Image (spheres, rainbow, N blue to C red):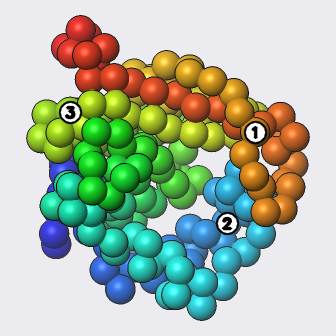
Amino acid sequence: MNTFLETDRLALRAFTGADAAHLLALDNDPDVMRFINGGRPTSREVIQEQTLPRLLHDYPCFGTRGYWAAEEKDSGLFLGWFEFRPLDEHNSAVAELGYRLHKAAWGCGYATEGSRALIRKGFMALGVQRVTANTMTVNAASRRVMEKAGLSFLRNFTGDWPEAIEGSEHGEVEYELTRAKWEQHQ
């Protein structure tokens, strides 16, 4: 296993082609996908041709990938994934944080634990100066994770939704954390 980062309870590892079944199950849970695409199912073809290539992409400025499979360290159970990737693949200054976890992992602190660890790694080892994260305004649970991970509300905005989903009429929110602010709290 190519482990990128470990926490007390999580192992974040590089994705492989063998993760297609995990991703298919995750992306076909309507509750998991509620704030992504309105809960519509994802086909195996989309997982193979779009999702996996995105998750397997290496970022030159990090010298590593930007997406990692999240497993429970003790059991090896696939919990979902985390994103921590540069907005410009050739410049590490600004990284985007994201996460998608199975419902069974919700409310257990995994999203916050993984997010904090990635933020620390980004500021300490990857040259990141600012972390940003976005979600729908109505996604209170994801917003709470961002806040618990140390990010602060920056702005509301309206994104271009290919297809409107319930709640998209309220727009989106962006949160951020700068390295300077993070260092003040260490």
State the CA–CA distance, disc 2 to disc 3: 33 Å
Considering only vertical position in the picture, is 52 above or below 36? below
| Label 2 SS | loop
Q: Is residue 53 above or below residue 175?
A: below
Q: Position of residue 37 (x, y in %)?
A: 73, 61
Q: CA distance from mark 1 to mark 2?
A: 26 Å
Q: Position of residue 75 (x, y in %)?
A: 28, 61
Quarter-of-image position of residue 3: bottom left
User: What percent of the width, then of the height, locates residue 27?
Assistant: 61, 69
User: On the image, numbered disc 2 is attached to which residue?
Assistant: 29
Q: Which residue appears at 82% of the width and 44% of the height?
A: 168
Describe residue 127's horizontal placement relative to residue 138 as left or right: left
User: Comparing marks 2 and 3, which lies closer to the viewer?
Assistant: 3
Q: Residues within 10 Å of mark 3 (few under 14, many from 20)?
A: many
Q: Which callout, 3 or 1, points at the residue further toward the start of the chain?
A: 3
Q: 159 or 5, which lies in front?
A: 159
* Front residue of this view, candidates 136 and 112: 136
> Is residue 73 among what the camera can see?
no
Q: Of label 1 and label 2, which has the lower sequence position?
A: 2
Instruction: Give amino acid for label 2.
Output: Asp
Q: Residues within 10 Å of mark 1 (few under 14, many from 20)?
A: few
Q: Give the distance between the C-alpha atoms of the residues marked 3 and 1, in whole angstroms.
A: 29 Å
Determine the residue located farthest toward the bottom in the rendered image: 45
The amino acid type of the residue labelled 3 equals Phe
Cβ atoms under marks 3 and 1 closer than 8 Å: no
Q: Name the residue that disc number 1 marks.
A: 158
> Which residue is located at x 50 percent, y 38 percent?
133
- Residue 88 in the image: state x and y as whole percent: 37, 52
What residue did someone put label 3 on? 123
Which residue of the protein is positioned furthest toward the top in this rendering?
184
Does residue 159 show up?
yes
